[in-house]
Image (tube, rainbow, N blue to C red):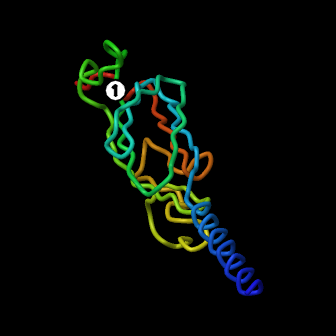
Amino acid sequence: MSGSTRLLFGGALCAASLLMGAAGAAADCVRTVHNRSPLVLVASQDGGPSFSVRPGGSRSIRLSRPGTLNLAGYCGRPGLRGDPAALGAPVVQETFGYQAVLDRCYFEFGHDFFANELGRGFAPYETTRPFALNNPRQGDIVLHTDRSACLPTF
């Protein structure tokens, strides 16, 4: 009986460690949204509350499951308490999907050439301008424009 108790107890420990290992496999990456532009960047992760990133600033975000990041760049200064409505219409606006699997967090775009090795979006694309995705590391995003984005057009 004592041998079977040990086997049962040892099996329970093995199952518990497998469950803990599977839970440890969930993604939990802290990445950064950088604003290297004169625009006020307003972002919202997975439809949640918006946050702003002032020119020259950055903000950390947590990627723990696949989702989306909505980004909009506005000319001018933020209104009361950063209300995006006080800024007028956005100059740039994009939504990007991201993946967060195990220890790999990255924005998806482009083709699947290196998908198995590096994840989608490894190769840079002109179509994501003025945003640089997966830069400077996978899962980071940078808004980069010059002051001409806010000049009036005649």
Dot 1, crowdedness within 10 Å: few (<14), some or many (≥20)? Answer: many
Image point (34%, 39%), residue name: 48
Is the residue 116 above or below the residue 41 in the image? below
- Return the x and y of residue 9 as percentages of the image width and height: 69, 76
Q: Indicate the quadrant containing the C terminus: top left, top right, bottom left or bottom right.
A: top left
Relative to 135, is 154 on the left or the right?
Answer: left
Q: Nearer the viewer, residue 21 or 116?
A: 21
Is the residue 20 above or below the residue 77 in the image? below
**Residue of label 1:** 74
Q: Nearer the viewer, residue 117 or 24?
A: 24
Q: Indicate the quadrant containing the N terminus: top left, top right, bottom left or bottom right.
A: bottom right
- Return the x and y of residue 84 as percentages of the image width and height: 29, 24
- Return the x and y of residue 136 as percentages of the image width and height: 62, 45
- Return the x and y of residue 67 as percentages of the image width and height: 40, 53
Q: How many marks?
A: 1
Relative to 88, is 148 on the left or the right?
Answer: right
The part of the image, by quadrant, that contains residue 40 is top left
Image point (47%, 37%), residue name: 143
Image point (63%, 74%), residue name: 15
- Most extreme residue toward the top is 80
The part of the image, by quadrant, that contains residue 88 is top left
Relative to 8, is 92 on the left or the right?
Answer: left
Q: Nearer the viewer, residue 71 or 152?
A: 71
- Label 1 residue SS: strand
Three-letter residue code for mark 1:
Tyr
Image point (54%, 36%), residue name: 60
The part of the image, by quadrant, that contains residue 148 is top left
Relative to 132, is 21 on the left or the right?
Answer: right
